[in-house]
Amino acid sequence: MSSITEPRQTWKLAAGLLVVFYALVTLLPLLWIISTGFKTPSDSIAYPPKILFEPTFEGYVNLFTTQTRQSEEFLANNPPTNWYEQLVHDKGMVIAGPSRYGERFFNSLIIGFGSTFLSVFLGTLAAYAFSRYRVPLKDDLLFFILSTRMMPPIAVAIPIFLMFRSLGLSDTHAGMILLYTAVNLSLAVWLLKGFIDEIPLEYEEAALIDGYTRFQAFRKVVLPQATTGIASTAIFCLIFSWNEYAFAVLLTSGSAQTAPPFIPTIIGVGGQDWPAVAAGATLFLVPVMVFTILLRKHLLRGITFGAVRK
């Protein structure tokens, strides 16, 4: 006899198949991008699309190098010395130097993680103040903070462009970090305030009775309890800063340009070099995936967060 609360085996099987199907549909574009990075340019645009192909690192070599075409005499007098030079040599070209992808990727790391740290740091302090203190016009201030998130960031692109140009922040790491921090701060405050509200106030009161200062109680009691919220907020902030395209195109062009506006400009011989574009997109996914995996334990704890009865 089956339990009233226990779902039937048929429903379990159907739910499992549905989850597997959804996972396959979700992962298929990602798997296709990864596989395209190991194709040749001709295989990447073949029709019908090639599922089985001979893998090559040509896309990654094209991504990290700049190449020039040379005469047959020059190629004969300058034989390749390693495997990636051989790949380029077979196309009648030589490596002229490194590409700018490495610089753009490093810019994304600095700007993305820098703005994420500032957003979470300032958001945690502001959320704690709104949660624990009697702030005048608290509801109005919280609504004003939230309203900045409702407006599409691109709607203020022109004023921000003029302001950055006047302050000398255009195409700088500091300017992009401050801009992304300002955009993410409203999300950080609201998310973290909800997590801190769930932490019983009695924990801090007990710490204060034991002789802790307010800051020590915040650092040693509240922060460990809010780790789940901080991890979740950091991931959301990093995803926005990491993927942001419009401001990066408008406000950067050289020294502070990030990877998203650079990847589409990768041009190969005879047109778009899709394997190099796919290779760049694949590598661009790695930091966010690693960051999420490192914080997965804290994210799983969020399922039971707030279960303590006050």
Image (spheres, rainbow, N blue to C red):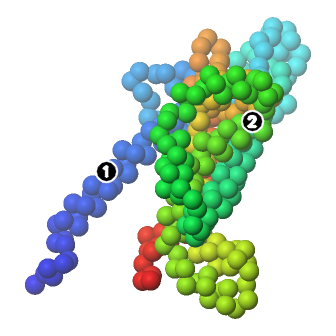
Residues packed near mark 1 inside 10 Å, few (<14), some (14 to 19) or many (20 plus): few
- The numbered disc on residue 8 is none
- The numbered disc on residue 21 is 1
Residues packed near mark 2 inside 10 Å, few (<14), some (14 to 19) or many (20 plus): some
The secondary structure type at the circle numbered 2 is helix
The C terminus lies in quadrant: bottom left
Q: Is residue 107 left or right of residue 30?
A: right
Provide residue 294's location: percent of width, then percent of height.
Answer: 62, 62
Q: Nearer the viewer, mark 1 or mark 2?
A: 2
The outermost residue toward the right is: 77
The N terminus lies in quadrant: bottom left
Q: Amino acid at mark 2?
A: Gly
- The numbered disc on residue 175 is 2
**Would you say residue 225 is visible in this rendering?**
yes
Q: Amino acid at mark 1?
A: Phe
Provide residue 251's location: percent of width, then percent of height.
Answer: 69, 26
Quarter of image, res 38: top right
- Residue situated in front as seen by the camera: 150 or 98: 150
The outermost residue toward the left is: 1
Provide residue 139's location: percent of width, then percent of height.
Answer: 49, 56
Q: Residue at x 81, y 27 (%)?
A: 168
